[in-house]
Image (cartoon, coloured by chain):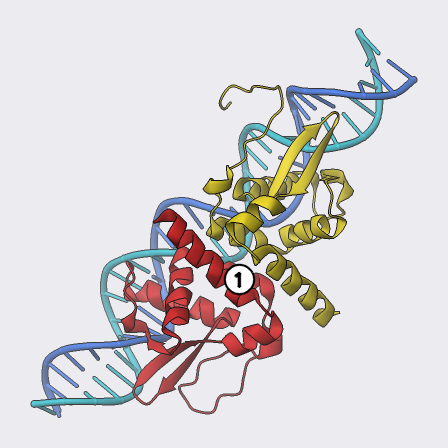
Chain colours: A red, B yellow, C cyan, D blue
Amino acid sequence: MTSPAVSSRDLPHPARDEIRLEPVLHALSDPMRLAIVRELATVGDELTCSQFELPVTKSTTTHHFRVLREAGVIRQIYRGTAKMNGLRKDDLDDLFPGLLDALLGAADRQAVRLG
Amino acid sequence: MTSPAVSSRDLPHPARDEIRLEPVLHALSDPMRLAIVRELATVGDELTCSQFELPVTKSTTTHHFRVLREAGVIRQIYRGTAKMNGLRKDDLDDLFPGLLDALLGAADRQAVRLG
DNA sequence: ACCGTAATACGATGGCTATCGTACGAGTCG
DNA sequence: CGACTCGTACGATAGCCATCGTATTACGGT
């Protein structure tokens, strides 16, 4: 199941111990979603969906954020009027120590390598 | 039919600098293929396809090995009569330092956690 | 040469998924 | 209220993919 809904506009997230490695890897295997996660990691803070410049429509963007959320990679919270997206770094680091950093490092390295 | 075979039986592998992170993650996001890679890592040596006990048919096994090979995760070589499968740990470590170990560690940790 | 084993190729199929367009709901600001 | 923005929901579509069964090829032993 998912975390309890406090507000009427809460979105379903997997609890920490419900996060599985395979869905996480699948979520990150899409270039668009990997770009989102990299952006979140470099900013180190929460961002709204519209702050990302992705070459896809809003519908597709929503889809990608949902995949990331359901895999447990990001957290989506309504903070006042805006919907903020943040990396679940604490949970991921607890479950899979060093994995997120290794993945981000690998992505950075590849970005440099490919120019 | 593909390009002319130098030997009668050699398989196409991506060169080291052709390996991309996304296909690697996609390859490892399948439970069957992750199990294969984990087995290869624990054995630390090359294995034939038939040495794996997977709950799928031979056709499907061949498919999974091909996905892993084309992503650059494993190397498949005909050594005499047997077809040996080995992890491309050297190439992966060079391209993405620490990633493979982090992934294997995460998989181990999840296996322990789920019993 | 013949047989058995190992692995691939090919074709089929059902399911997943990335993408889009349009329509809708929630919230802000005039 | 009305208009505008942001994000979601739904339906559709095309492509990919995990799986299977069967036929076929490659090689070693008898």
| Left-right relation of A108 to C21 | right
* Quadrant location, the N terminus of chain A: bottom right
**Where residue B51 appears, x then y in whole percent?**
77, 42
The answer, for residue A62, to whether it is visible in the render is yes
| Left-right relation of A115 to A87 | left
Q: Nearer the viewer, residue A89 or C30?
A: A89
Is A67 rendered above or below residue B82?
A: below
Is D15 rendered above or below residue C15?
A: above
Q: Residue at x 48, y 52 (%)?
A: B21
| Left-right relation of A91 to C20 | right
Query: Counting other residues with Cα less than 10 Å from the Cα at mark 1, is it few (<14), some (14-19), or many (20 or more)?
Result: some
Q: Residue at x 60, y 69 (%)?
A: A96
Chain of the residue displaying label 1: A
Give the residue pinned by disc 1: A102
SS at badge 1:
helix
**Where residue A72 appears, x then y in whole percent?**
52, 72
Q: Residue at x 51, y 19 (%)?
A: B4
The answer, for residue A27, to whether it is visible in the render is no
Q: Nearer the viewer, residue B58 or A22?
A: A22
**Where residue A44 appears, x then y in whole percent?**
40, 75
Q: Amino acid at mark 1?
A: Ala
**Where residue B106 appears, x then y in whole percent?**
63, 64
Residue A107 image-quadrant placement: bottom left
Q: Residue at x 28, y 72 (%)?
A: A51
